[in-house]
Each structure stands twice: as C-alpha cells, then as structure tokens.
Image (cartoon, helix red, strand yellow):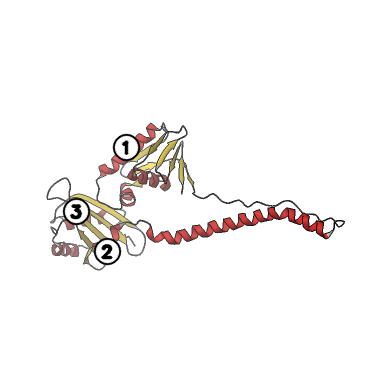
C-alpha cells in the first residue's frame, strides 16, 4: 500500500510521513509508525501482547516502551490539529483507534480506451479510399492495444514481485529453532533460549516443567530469558505458546524472575483464560 487516509490525516507508508490537509507534516520514527499502522488496519482493540509481537518482533520490552510510543502518537495528532483522532486505552485489554480508514494502493488501475467510432464503408467509395479511411482509424485501435498490453504487463509484474520478494519479508525470529535448545518433547514441547550466559540450570528447569500437569496441550512453548536491565541478578522472561495445529498463539512476559522460579513463571503463561491448554 502507498498510503493510509484516516479522518483528517494521511500516512505515506514509504516515507513514514504523517500529514494533514494544511500541509503540516511529521515524520514518524519506525516504532510509532508500526504501531499506528497496526492499530489502523486492525480496526478493533489491540492487546499489548499483540503489539509487542507484531511491532517489536516478540523482543523483551517493558510496558513503558509501548506507553511512550502511544504518547508520541497522541502528541503528533495534537500537533497536526487532528483533535478528533484519539487512541483509546481499553482497560485490561490494550488500545483502540476508532477511525474510518482508506487504504490507497500503490498502483492505479490502467483504464482501457474504448474506440466508440464506427467505421462505415461507403459502397460508392473505391477500395483504395476505403483502405485510407480504415487507416485513419488504425491509431485508435493501436492505443487500445497498447493500453491492454500495459495492463497485462502491470499485472504480471505485480504477481512476479509477490513471488520474488515474499521470501525476503521480515519475519519474527521468535520461533527460529536454531536459537533454542529443546528441553522436553511432547504435548507441549518446551524450547529454551538462554541469554543469561548459562545462569539457567537446564536440568532443574526440565525437571520442574516435566512435573507439570499439561497433558494434551498441543503447543510449542518458546522460552526466552535475558538479564534484566534494571536489577542485577534478575531475569526477564518472554514465553510464547504456539499451537501445533493452528495459527493461534499467546505471549506472556515476566520481568522479575530468578533461576529457581523460572519454571513457575513459565507455567503462569498457561493460566491465561485465552489459553487453558486448548490451543489446538
């Protein structure tokens, strides 16, 4: 898409430029741009977990990071005199941007020029004159042919671009198994990415997770741990539960974990009402 028109503002996607009808413009930073586009296209309340997953790629970040981005967007709306646009905070859910959205595509459809002029052959005209008269209309038919050719070429180019660039689209590294060590195989299957330089006792963690009663929970559980940037000796954790049989997933974060309480914190992800070991 080339741009998104919503209320009195227009967002140009290639340059991340947000502008109003008076020529005032603001260039958004990448994260506010990603959050704004996600809220606009979703058209419904978005949870913090969704925003972290889609806009931060599942990276371990604090709630304050998202709050700061929302504040930046609200400030931009105010500067651009778009007071009618409001990002609503939905208690215990997330955020909602309730506006009418018009997506402007990059390519305009090519219109075929129709030749509505009928060529009437006069019987009294000699064949040479008829040929000359038909030749006079040939350029119009040529225009029709060229327009149709351009339309077909544009469609082929769009289809080819889809297949060529699809493999290069950025994807979340969260489920890249090359970054993980498998702890338990089954239902669920647990994977661990230890970013704490070996402070996690994998054998103890595996033992504790194995004792949990999670039978018939058909999910892959990706556990990522990193040292907290706020307190020494504290671990920040993000857990993603992904169904083995569908696209359903759930993200859980905890920013105050120790090696001994890691298993307990991981199992807290299953307490969410959205999960209940029914991801299949």
Q: Earlier in the sequence, mark 3 or mark 2?
A: 2
Task: Give x and y (percent) for residue 195.
Answer: 19, 56
SS state under label 1? helix
Q: Earlier in the sequence, mark 1 or mark 3?
A: 1
Q: How many marks?
A: 3
SS state under label 2? helix
Query: Could you say which is closer to the camera, residue 62 or residue 111?
Result: 111
Residue 277 appears anywhere in the view: no
Residue 35 appears anywhere in the view: yes
SS state under label 3? strand
* Residue that numbered label 2 is attached to: 177
Q: Are marks 2 and 1 in contact (CB under 8 Å)?
A: no
Q: Residues within 10 Å of mark 3 (few under 14, many from 20)?
A: some
* C-alpha separation, residue under disc 3 versus residue under disc 2: 17 Å
In the picture, residue 67 is in which quadrant? top left
Q: Earlier in the sequence, mark 2 or mark 1?
A: 1
Residue 167 is tagged as: none
Q: Residue at x 55, y 58 (%)?
A: 153
Q: Residues within 10 Å of mark 1 (few under 14, many from 20)?
A: few
Task: Give x and y (percent) for residue 97.
Answer: 40, 41
User: Image quadrant for the C terminus?
Assistant: bottom left
Residue 226 is tagged as: 3
Query: Could you say which is closer to the camera, residue 100 or residue 211?
Result: 100
Task: Give x and y (percent) for residue 136.
Answer: 74, 53
Q: Residues within 10 Å of mark 2 (few under 14, many from 20)?
A: few
* C-alpha separation, residue under disc 1 versus residue under disc 3: 27 Å
* Residue that numbered label 1 is attached to: 71
Q: Residue at x 36, y 39 (%)?
A: 88
Q: Are marks 1 and 3 in contact (CB under 8 Å)?
A: no
């Amino acid at each position: 898409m080339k741009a998104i028109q919503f209320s009195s503002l227009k967002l140009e996607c290639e340059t991340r430029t947000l502008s109003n009808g008076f020529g005032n413009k603001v260039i958004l930073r990448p994260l506010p741009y990603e959050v704004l586009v996600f809220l606009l296209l979703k058209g419904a309340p978005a949870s913090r977990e969704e925003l972290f997953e889609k806009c931060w790629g599942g990276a371990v970040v604090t709630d304050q990071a998202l709050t700061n981005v929302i504040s930046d967007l609200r400030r931009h709306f105010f500067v651009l005199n778009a007071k009618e646009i409001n990002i609503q905070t939905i208690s215990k859910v997330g955020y909602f941007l309730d506006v009418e959205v018009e997506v402007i595509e990059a390519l305009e459809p090519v219109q075929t020029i129709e030749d509505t002029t009928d060529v009437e052959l006069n019987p009294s005209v000699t064949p040479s004159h008829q040929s000359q008269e038909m030749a006079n209309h040939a350029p119009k038919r040529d225009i029709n042919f060229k327009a149709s050719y351009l339309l077909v070429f544009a469609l082929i180019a769009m289809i080819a671009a889809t297949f060529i660039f699809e493999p290069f689209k950025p994807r979340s590294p969260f489920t890249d198994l090359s970054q993980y060590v498998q702890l338990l195989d089954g239902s669920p299957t647990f994977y661990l990415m230890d970013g704490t330089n070996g402070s996690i006792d994998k054998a103890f963690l595996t033992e504790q997770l194995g004792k949990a009663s999670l039978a018939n929970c058909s999910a892959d559980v990706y556990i990522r741990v990193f040292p907290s940037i706020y307190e020494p000796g504290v671990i920040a954790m993000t857990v993603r539960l992904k169904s083995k049989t569908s696209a359903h997933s759930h993200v859980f974060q905890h920013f105050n974990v120790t090696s001994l309480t890691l298993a307990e914190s991981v199992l807290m992800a299953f307490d969410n009402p959205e999960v209940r070991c029914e991801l299949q």
